[in-house]
Amino acid sequence: MTMQHTAISLDLINRHNQEPNRNRYESRYFWEELYPLLAAAGFSAIEIPYEPVWQFGGRSGVPFNRYCVNTKYGDAAGYRAKLAECGISRVAGITFDPNLFMRNANLDFFFGASGHFAGEALAHAVDMGADYFAISPSPYYGRVAQYHPDIADKLDLFTERTVGLISGLAAKAEELGVSLVLRGEYWSLFGGDRQQALLAALPASVKLDVDTANLFVAGISAAEFLRANIARVGCVHLTDTAFVDDVQVWQTANPEHPAGHATQVFRDPGTGSVDLAGIVKLLGELGYTGPVTVSARQTRDPFRALLRTRALLNQIQA
């Protein structure tokens, strides 16, 4: 398979943790300087996380929801024109996770807020001309357990309501011509081997988002997973890690930055233990032609990560 049209996720910019001068990430100028650098590194397509938190904070410089985009650019068409001016020809996908809305013991609040903003994110994906809408099926397991210590007893109810929410979104996505893909995060209530039971209860139009680092942490071979599920794969995320979860970190409140470990989970592509070159080769052998997005999630140095990622893709293509 060719890597020419591989997208890069904007999750390489870490917006969630404090650091000196973090406020530059919250300014429009930062993002408008970033887009030409992405293009210079050989990326003409991007993936955008949909994050309502920037709307709530009034920081419309972060172009990660409809409110912010409309405030700064008038509408999605205006934003896409700016991207094109900077060398970014398309938005490959929009991602959404409901972690923000697990903030109390009221499941009606959680599913109501998650459903509303997931619908907003899906509509935004359509406006952006995205190929896929990738949704996380649950918040962190540890965050759920914080407010629902009896989650083991509520799992059937949580699953039933999750199936209802995603099934409704899938029907809308199919009608609108966007592929809805289910993210497989190791920290999810439906992570690892638990994802298959959820997928079996969902409409056939719901596809799998194969994230290589998440599979690695969950102890699942990405190669075997792809061979077994290629017919239902709707997106592939090339992500890297060297983290081995031998103390059930997936059940903790902050699984991306494990307590007691002098590391973060995700690494820049090519610097971890995931055989990304082998996975790309396998995708070609399996005849996969769907979206591929590379991610340097939570990187400490986004511009170095950008060049590392391009160097890796050049090596894979050589």
Image: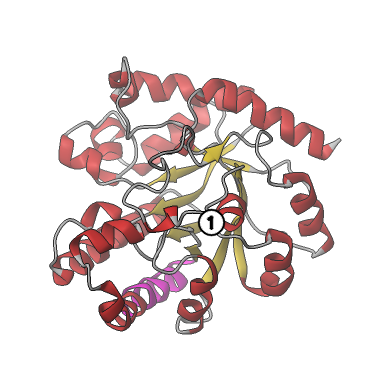
Q: Residue at x 80, y 58 (%)?
A: 282
Q: Residue at x 23, y 63 (%)?
A: 116
Residue 142 placed where, x, y %?
Answer: 32, 57
Q: Can residue 178 be seen by looking at this rendering? A: no
Q: Quadrant of residue 210?
A: bottom right
Q: Is residue 87 magenta?
A: no
Q: Residue at x 31, y 51 (%)?
A: 253
Residue 8 placed where, x, y %?
Answer: 57, 39
Residue 215 placed where, x, y %?
Answer: 59, 58
Vertical placement of residue 226 versus 39, above or below = below
Q: Nearer the viewer, residue 31 or 311?
A: 311
Amino acid type at circle 1 is: Asp
Q: From this viewpoint, which residue is outermost toward the top?
A: 21
Q: Nearer the viewer, residue 238 or 132?
A: 238
Q: Residue at x 52, y 32 (%)?
A: 84
Is 33 left or right of 76, judged from the image as shown? right
Residues drawn in magenta? 164-177
Q: Is residue 165 magenta?
A: yes
Give the main secondary structure, helix, strand or loop, of the magenta stretch.
Answer: helix
**What residue is shown with label 1?**
131
Q: Quadrant of residue 230?
A: bottom right
Residue 10 placed where, x, y %?
Answer: 47, 37
Quarter of the figure that contains the C terminus: top right
Q: Nearer the viewer, residue 5 or 101?
A: 101
Q: Quadrant of residue 239?
A: top right
> Colour scheme of this structure image?
secondary structure
